[in-house]
Amino acid sequence: QVQLKESGPGLVQPSQTLSLTCTVSGFSLTSYSVHWVRQHSGKSLEWMGRMWSDGDTSYNSAFTSRLSISRDTSKSQVFLKMNSLQTEDTGTYYCARSPLDLDYFDYWGQGVMVTVSS
Amino acid sequence: DIQMTQSPASLSASLGETVTIECLASEDIYSNLAWYQQKPGKSPQLLIYYANSLNDGVPSRFSGSGSGTQYSLKINSLQSEDVSIYFCQQNYDSPTFGGGTKLELK
């Protein structure tokens, strides 16, 4: 069945770089888009960016300068890398799939909680 | 960016009651609107897409409607398991979400 699972460090120091991995199963990254969405402490959701099925990427303009999304199709993994982290970046980071390269999310990972603190 | 304004922010209702949550887009999103349910400590789950299409496995007491800039999610015959936070999301442009509606039992 379709599954997505995020992994990465739970604690990052301010000004450092966050690296997260989304490992998927049950579908191919060459057929579906995978997105990153974050949530601050039970509050609303914020779309960060996407890896299209064709390997292209697009980003929320709020993150463009410090966010990078890449993938390894052989390992069924999508990566998020965001630099210059600040305390405001604390939250839960989700990867999510969208069907047919549309932009609603039919499957989500469990999320990974990231705290930015010294 | 398209702004999504969701109301109410919180809602208290009794078992068996019908509940409606509204979502207003800052511009026409041509029915490119999804609704999600998020239970405490869990990831969001897709309920509705294209404003009124029920996702597989979602109970039929959930329904969506609307067009243009105004959309709504209706829950008929409220059940205890419906206690959650509900989010709308537009996918006409770069995705943006509403602020959420916390639904509790009265």
Image (spheres, rainbow, N blue to C red):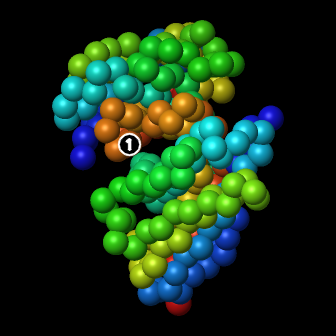
Q: Could you tell me the amino acid type at mark 1?
A: Pro
B53 lies left or right of A75: left
- The percent position of residue B48, horizontal first and vertical second, equals 51, 22
Foreground pick, A10 / B49: B49
Foreground pick, B81 / A90: A90
- The percent position of residue A104, horizontal first and vertical second, equals 48, 34
For image coordinates 25% across by 41% down, the residue present is: B3
Q: Which residue is mark 1?
A: B95
Work out whether B38 lies above or below A62. Answer: above
Q: Is residue A108 visible?
A: no
Work out whether B22 lies above or below A48. Answer: above
Residue B2 appears in which quarter of the rendering?
A: top left
Work out whether A86 lies above or below B49. Answer: below
For image coordinates 55% across by 25% down, the residue present is: B47
- The percent position of residue A55, horizontal first and vertical second, equals 54, 52
For image coordinates 34% across by 44% down, the residue present is: B94
For image coordinates 62% across by 60% down, the residue present is: A71
The chain letter for the residue carrying disc 1 is B
Foreground pick, A66 / B62: A66
Find the residue positioned furthest to the front.
A54
Residue B69 appears in which quarter of the rendering?
A: top left
